[in-house]
Each structure stands twice: as structure tokens, then as C-alpha cells.
Image (tube, helix red, strand yellow):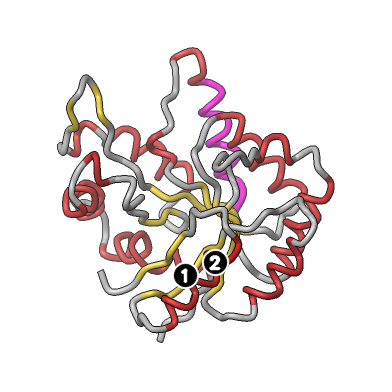
Amino acid sequence: MTGAVVVECSPLIEDNQWVLDASANDSSIVGVVGFLDAGKPGFGQDLDRFGKDPLFRGVRYGDLWGRNIVEQMGNPQFVEDMRLLAEMDMSLDSANPHLDLLEALLQLSDQVPDLRIIVDHLPKLPVAASERARYERILGEFSARPQTYVKISAVLLEQGGTVSYELDDYRSTIDEIAGAFGEDRVLYGSDWPNSDPLGTYGQVIGIVREYFEEKSESAREKYFRLNSMAAYKWVDG
């Protein structure tokens, strides 16, 4: 690993500045995704403040720290803030996927079609048999939206008290997501440090590395590097 985009998860505004300050002295950090309160007064000022730093590449918002993107879709100020994000050529990362959240992201994509949306950690979403048709429909709708991306991350799962490190136990899930978004819109994500209870970093990256070793060199380069440049607009060097 030679570079990374840091996705902030702290709800404290000043922690965004802490991450930017730390990243300024670390050449391995190529971008920072902040955590700002879209839909509330002050979002625009905060975005303008942090957006002056070229490392600041977007905002994370999802079901995290009491935030609820499904509810926010009924808040006109939230949608306006997302338009502002798009106007500044920045992206939106989601958090903690579930079907209602995915449908809210589709709705947001309809209302702000220029906004680049990155769906985080989709492989960890459990899909009940009764919801399979709904999930497949959602994936199909994402497939038709070129400004949406997905992180094939949080792949490792605990089942029956154990964690498998065999690719075949995850292959069908990855195949379905990768097939829906296509090789130009899938990104690597570590989910570190949340991944620590499930395995070492080597085990986390090992599953997706093995999967993409079976693909073309171009597909590997896109997944591990080039697609993140398209999604976050970070600048090499």
C-alpha cells in the first residue's frame, strides 16, 4: 500500500482539522473525507473552510452517530447541501448500508445527479430471502447511474462464531456487486480499524487481492487505485 484516502468517522467538527493537519505531514495520505452535519446550519461554512485544503475530497453521511439519511431526504436543506457538495466537485460517502439507505441514495442521485456517491461496505449487508428481489432491483438502478461507486470492503464476516478466509465463501457476494457496478466503479476499502476483530490487515486485503488476481491487470489497477481517483478526484503526486 502506497497511499490512502482517510474517511473520518468522528462527529466532532474540529477532528476534521486534526486529520487534515496530520495528513499534511504524511505523503501516503492522498485525500480526506470529512464528517460534516449536512442539513443543519453551518454546513456550507464548514465545507468552505475545510474545502480550501486540497486534501479535503468529500463528506461522509449515513447511519452513524445518530445521523439518518433516510429521514434527511425529507429535509430540503440537506438536499441543498448535497447540491453544494456537487458544485464543489466533492463526493458523498455513505455508512452502514441497509436497503432503506440504499434507496435513499438512489433518490438523492435522482435529485442531485452530478453528485458522486460512494456506497461504503456493501458486502456486509445481509439480504434476507424475502428481500432478494428488492436488493437486485436496487443494484440494477445503481448500475444505470455512472456517478455512483461502491467500496468492495468489509468483506469478512463472522458466522457461527468463526471467520472464513476462503475466497469461495465470499465470491458470489463480490461477483454480484462487481457485476452491477462494473469494473470502472468498484473501489478498495479496508474498513480499518473496524476490521480488526475479524482478521489482520493482511487477511482483509488478502480476500479481495485473491479475487482481483483472477481479473485483468487493468481491472486490478482500477479497483485498487484508478477508480478512487475518479471517485474522489484526488491528485497523484
What's under tag 2, amino acid-wise?
A: Asn
Query: Residue 177 location in percent, x, y?
Result: 42, 40
**Label 2's element?**
helix
Q: Of residues 54 and 87, which is closer to you in this image?
A: 54
User: Residue 103 occupies which quadrant of the picture?
Assistant: top right
Query: Residue 186 location in percent, x, y?
Result: 42, 53
Looking at the image, residue 219 sits to the left or right of residue 163; the answer is right
Give residue 213's mark: none
How many tags in the picture? 2
The residue under the point 21% across, 46% down is: 207
Q: Of residues 79 and 134, which is closer to you in this image?
A: 79
Q: Which residues are magenta?
A: 133-146
35 inside magenta stretch = no
The residue under the point 36% across, 56% down is: 188
Residue at which label 2 appears: 16
Q: Quadrant of the N terminus?
A: bottom left
**Prevailing secondary structure of the magenta residues:** helix
Residue at which label 1 appears: 19
Q: Mark 2 Cα within 10 Å, few/some/many (few <14, many 20+)?
A: many
Distance in Å between CA atoms under marks 2 and 1: 5 Å
Looking at the image, residue 102 sits to the left or right of residue 159; the answer is right
Q: Of residues 130 and 33, which is closer to you in this image?
A: 33
User: Residue 51 occupies which quadrant of the picture?
Assistant: bottom right
When the figure is inspected, residue 216 is found, relative to residue 47, above or below; the finding is: above
Query: Residue 119 location in percent, x, y?
Result: 51, 47
The residue under the point 31% across, 32% down is: 172
Looking at the image, residue 81 sits to the left or right of residue 165; the answer is right
**Label 1's element?**
helix
Contact, CB < 8 Å: mark 2 with mark 1?
yes
The residue under the point 42% across, 82% down is: 236
143 inside magenta stretch = yes
